[in-house]
Image: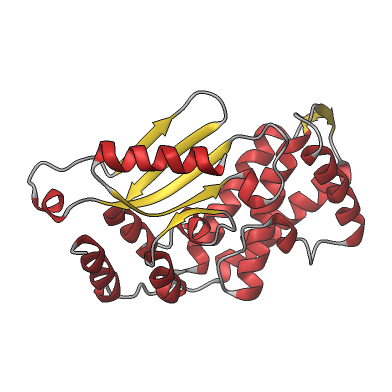
Amino acid sequence: MQAVIQKHLAELEAKENIRILFAIESGSRAWGFASPDSDYDVRFIYVRPVTEYLKLEKRRDVIEYMLTGELDINGWDLDKALKLMRLSNPTFFEWCNSPIVYQQTDFLQKLNRIKDKYFYGKAGLHHYLNMAGRNYREYLKGDEVRLKKYFYVLRPLLACAWILKEGAPPPMLFKELLADLPHNLRVIVDGLLDMKMNNPEIAQGKKMVELNDWIEAEIKTIEAQLAKLPAEKKPDWQELDELFLAEVMA
């Protein structure tokens, strides 16, 4: 699949007249709990020739390359990516931290040297808390639930706990976030992980009361801590401007 992905990325570069700065895996494969039939979610940052940024009529700043089957490829223009970075967009930080890299230039190393100063805990907490709350309300409140949705609640809540403790972007790998989970819940989650990673699809099942109780308590705890955090000041544009110009003019 690595070769197939790289072939599609090369085709995109030629078709769209772009240069891909890095391409990574996002989603369950990068989080470390992919099922045997999980899709490949490829995400990338690209740059266009300098003349494209000087035109009055602007192009879309997103490329969506939807393929049938198991492969989904999407990318952001460098202009969009750096603006989102300054806003501390958590998705962008996840892309930077992905353990699965399909293609890269030295841009990723340059980015990693400066990116943490653009991370704001409040923005990350809002993002992950909203994600956890939405998935919990939609999928885990009934007596019968979609069991795999526990991961889409637990991971963002554990990401919140990481941010509150470390003041830094959370790691992508789910297992790296599990250290502070109570032992009785860790046993349950390990069982779910084994089920998800060794079966094409986790079916519906009875809700896990212990997990639900912990989730509801954790959401309230994070909401209370978030409300106490002070406003954060955004850095200026200088380093991002320099990084943007260096890539556009390369």
Q: Which residue is drawn at 92% across and 56% down?
A: 184
Is residue 23 in view from this perspective? yes
Q: Which residue is drawn at 71% across and 38% down?
A: 149
How many numbered dots are placed on residues in this image?
A: 0
Report the colour scheme: secondary structure
Quarter of the view holding residue 35: top right
Left or right relative to 97: residue 190: right
Which quarter of the image is occupied by the C terminus?
A: bottom left
Left or right relative to 112: residue 78: left
Which quarter of the image is occupied by the N terminus?
A: top right
**Residue 38 placement (x, y as % from top left):** 65, 35
- In the depicted structure, whether residue 68 falls above or below residue 19: above
- Residue projecting furthest to the top: 68
Q: Which of 130 and 152 is in front in this view?
A: 152
**Residue 40 placement (x, y as % from top left):** 57, 38
Q: Which of 3 and 62 is in front in this view?
A: 3
Q: Which of 35 and 131 is in front in this view?
A: 35
Is residue 143 in view from this perspective? no
Quarter of the view holding residue 36: top right
Q: Nearer the viewer, residue 142 or 116?
A: 116
Q: Residue at x 66, y 73 (%)?
A: 165
**Residue 99 placement (x, y as % from top left):** 59, 58
